[in-house]
Image: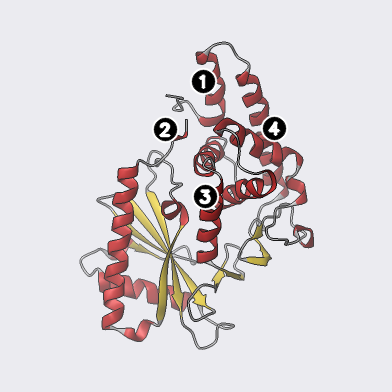
Amino acid sequence: MSAKLALPGEDRNKHRKQVGRLLETLEAKLHEDGSYRIKKFRRAGSLEKGTSNRPRAGKPVDADIGVYFDVDDPESFDLAHLLQLIKQLLEAAYPQKSTEDFDDSGGRIVEVTFRESGLEVDLVPIVSLDADANYGYQYSRAGDRVKTSVKVHIDHYRDHAARDPFLAPTLRMAKRWRNWQELDGIQSFHLELLLSYLIDRDGSAPSLEESFRRVFLFIIRDLSAGVAFDGADPGGFSEPMVIVDPANNANNITARMTSTELQALVTSARTAYETITWANGLPGKGETVSAWKELLGEGFAIE
């Protein structure tokens, strides 16, 4: 099932190589001009983890890069200035590209568009908090400064993927379901951590279908208790939904999710669980496929 959703391997390799060339170009420019005080670039996101879906119509493939800065006072820094530095570095490294290809209008990232390949790369400024640029301060969508770690997130995913081969395909299906059901508030990283938590709690799933089914059952029955890792306590937060950042026990990464969005998630999960259970007992393949299409869209196919 999931193979139909996954970004094809040749496309992933092509885009990863393009990200690599971007980083090589930026590193060369930094070698020429050390005034930017950038300590490290770290690849992040679905493309790096290998969990990207085929892009939806009109949507590009996206990649993420954490840009770790060395600043005089990590407790006090100007995000707008860091964004300006990233944009200046990109313009210096790619003088042939239009300034329209470097977009910082979102206020948290600088987005680079490679129009020929259809790849968009988000460069996220992070203030380094250690010599190896493992941890740093990043501004959240809510406008708060939070301590987090790209490295910890990547290692966390890879550790769980090594323990359960169904993690990546289930995540692709969960993202497709989220998009088809038009659920707001729940992000790909949130879904990844829900699945990782189930691996910690219940072990590797016995099948892809069961892996998909149990995430819905968890949302229905247990999500209200919150999700945390390595002994962290999700009970210390007051927001409607709690998923504790594996890189920072004080950070609830779902803090912006509203009660309405959470209720829509639970309602949709209940429908999905009932549909999968019902489809499992249908006698014909066509009927089963039709039931799955209710969850994943008309373009979904088993073979």
* Residue under numbered circle 2: 4
Which one is closest to the eye, mark 4 or mark 3? Answer: 3
Residue 97 x/y as whole percent:
24, 64
- Label whose residue precedes the other's in the sequence (4 or 3): 3
- Label whose residue precedes the other's in the sequence (1 or 3): 3
- Label whose residue precedes the other's in the sequence (1 or 4): 4
The crowd level at tag 4 (other Cα within 10 Å; few <14, some 14-19, many 20+) is some
- Label whose residue precedes the other's in the sequence (2 or 1): 2
Which one is closest to the eye, mark 1 or mark 3? Answer: 3
Mark number displayed over residue 86: none
Residue in view at x 77 percent, y 50 percent? 225
Residue in view at x 54 percent, y 64 percent? 152
Mark 2 and mark 4: Cα distance apart in space: 24 Å
Image quadrant for the C terminus? Answer: top left
Residue in view at x 31 percent, y 79 percent? 30
The crowd level at tag 2 (other Cα within 10 Å; few <14, some 14-19, many 20+) is some
- Label whose residue precedes the other's in the sequence (3 or 2): 2
Residue 23 x/y as whole percent:
32, 67
Q: Is residue 201 visible?
A: yes
Question: What amino acid is at disc 3?
Answer: Ala
Give the side of residue 7 with respect to residue 25, left or right: right
Question: What amino acid is at disc 4?
Answer: Arg
Q: Is residue 118 visible?
A: no
The crowd level at tag 3 (other Cα within 10 Å; few <14, some 14-19, many 20+) is few
Question: What amino acid is at disc 1?
Answer: Val
Give the side of residue 134 with respect to residue 63, left or right: right
* Residue under numbered circle 3: 162
Q: Is residue 256 above or below residue 163?
A: below
Mark 1 and mark 4: Cα distance apart in space: 19 Å
* Residue under numbered circle 1: 289
Q: Is residue 262 above or below residue 285?
A: below
Residue 66 x/y as whole percent:
45, 67
